[in-house]
Amino acid sequence: MNGEIQPMMMVVVALIVFGIGLFGLLIRKNLLIMLMCIELMLNSVNLCFVAFSKMHQSVLGDLTVLFVMTVAAAESAVGLGLVIAMFRTLKSVDTDQIQILRD
Amino acid sequence: MSLPILPWLVLSIGLLATILISVVRVGTKRPAQIFALLTLLATFFYSVTTVPSGVENVFNGAFEVSALTQVGLALFSLIGCIFVLGTSRYLTKEGIHISDYYHLMLLMILGAAVMIGSKDLISIFIALEVMSLPAYTLAGFRRHDARSNEAGIKYFVMGGAIGAVFLLGAAFIFGATGSVSIDKIFEWSKVAQGDFTLFYIGHLLVLIAFLFKVAAVPFHFWKPDVYEGSPIAVTGMMATVISAASFIVISRLIGIVDFGRIEWGAYAAQLKQVVRVIVVMSLVVGSAVLLTQSNLKRMLAYSSISHTGYLLLGILSSISHPQEIFSVWMYLFGYCLMTSGLFVLLSQSEPKADMGVELIDLTGLMKRSPYTTCLWIVFLFSMAGIPFTVGFFSKYFVFLSSVSAGETAFVVIAAVCAVVSAYAYIRPVALMVMRDADPSASNWKGSPVSTVVATVSALAVIYFGVLPGTIVQFLKGVPIGH
């Protein structure tokens, strides 16, 4: 057992990373950082899947990771596109600048 | 050889053809629009002519072809047709009548159509993203307008976080059950023993992700802003296609475990308690804030939040009484019909300067264009649930189902909220009919095609409001998957 990483330890690490991502998403104002936080959340879920895959001795979780990475890449492409469109109009990537729509 | 996924294939191939044709003929706008329309019509045709009677699992159980999924696809392609035809003039006016709009729209419909058939958490996730990524882009499609940028960014950040939350839930469910296939998880739930904590957390996380997507209170805060900032045609698609697809997936995810088994009884009770709280909050917040709105798109956003409440009431009664789920399908059918018609009418507005469409723009519409006013009245009455419109029967069957599931107290709350929100829907009618046009009121001018489309929708709303028998019989016979 010495030196071997337990699956549940990996899950705990993944949850901590997910928490960092979520926390960053909630408190940061810079949209590029927020994009990174979303990526962090998705990658922590990847770690989770790998851990559970190891626990169940199944290849399903490892396969899922490939799908998630593909989707994450597509998502950041769309996100960066939107950020660029916003930067062209408002000359800023700060969320404080996008407060036009209000009740 | 029969090919159960033919309608989905038609849509995918049509999407690729639409993209190719706009690459070949650069500079003109028409080919993409015509191809998109043909694709949607062909999809509609193939899906209504080949409705299967049973449930057919394809792709090794990862995808379900049944009456439900196929009628869902038919409904989505019909809504697509309504918006392609009805909002063409609006898109030209906004300067976004370009072929990319149609590619993204078809991709969004394809994602929604695949999502309702998915029986595997991973394919649900991929379909969710295929549906959402075009939606983020479309929300920010008026890219020189700061409001549209804001809507796109807000929708994207929310949607990205939702996707991650859904995946975390899927990972937990995988950890608890060793599978991501909904059928296999159901089999597992019949025999599983021991501690289910990991599964509970995972199940709640995937449900929360979709409750965010349909904007049930308290997960609703993004919706009014995104609705207001997006182009009207896109808001209409979001309100109908994305909401309907998400509700079908919610019903699938709720039924993922065998609640008939005694081990799941305590969890079923807790889950119902959670859904009850969300139902009441959605109904109360949706109806109450609806009264205070003056911007028509924000008003429709809060209206859809209150509709979410009624739909969740139907879902709530289906937890213990699975056969009552037909009331949710009926509500979705009526809701999609009236909402798409209303958004087509809304796209006929010509607001001054940069402002959105306000309630005051409707003043005196009766004198300016009596015919359009009649269409408005039909859709608004249907939204309010007044008899002889489809909106009445939508609410009626949800209430009936909830009473037979023993949720009488919540039916009373829902009925009170329906009365309160009826005032908000009647107010625009009063402005249109009884007031003279305000000097600042904007013009309303629709293309003949969009008026015809709205007329057909309005006739359907009245037809199914007077004679709902056929559609109700059909929806009751839809086989219930789990």
Image (cartoon, coloured by chain):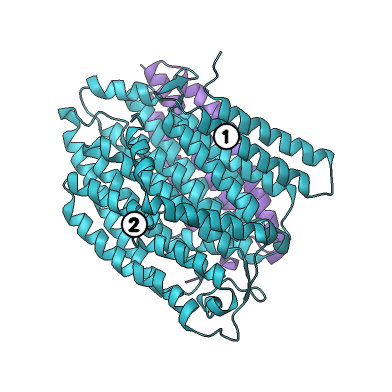
Residue tagged by mark 1?
B45
The disc, 1 or 2, on the residue closer to the chain's N-terminal end is 1
Query: What is the chain letter for disc 1?
Result: B
Pick the front one: B23 or A103: B23
Q: Please identify the residue farthest to the top as the structure is shown.
A: B1
State the SS at label 2: helix
Q: CA distance from mark 1 to mark 2?
A: 28 Å
| Quadrant the N terminus of chain B occupies | top right
Colour of chain B in the image: cyan
Q: Which mark is residue B392?
A: 2
Where is residue B132? Give x, y as percent: 55, 44
| Quadrant the C terminus of chain B occupies | top left
Q: How many marks?
A: 2
> Image check: B232 left or right of B167?
right
> For the residue marked with disc 1, what is the amino acid?
Phe
Q: Is residue B273 above or below residue B73?
A: below
Query: What is the chain letter for disc 2?
Result: B
Where is residue B338? Give x, y as percent: 46, 56
Contact? badges 1 and 2 (CB < 8 Å): no
Colour of chain A in the image: purple
> For the residue marked with disc 2, what is the amino acid?
Phe
Where is residue B461? Give x, y as percent: 44, 54
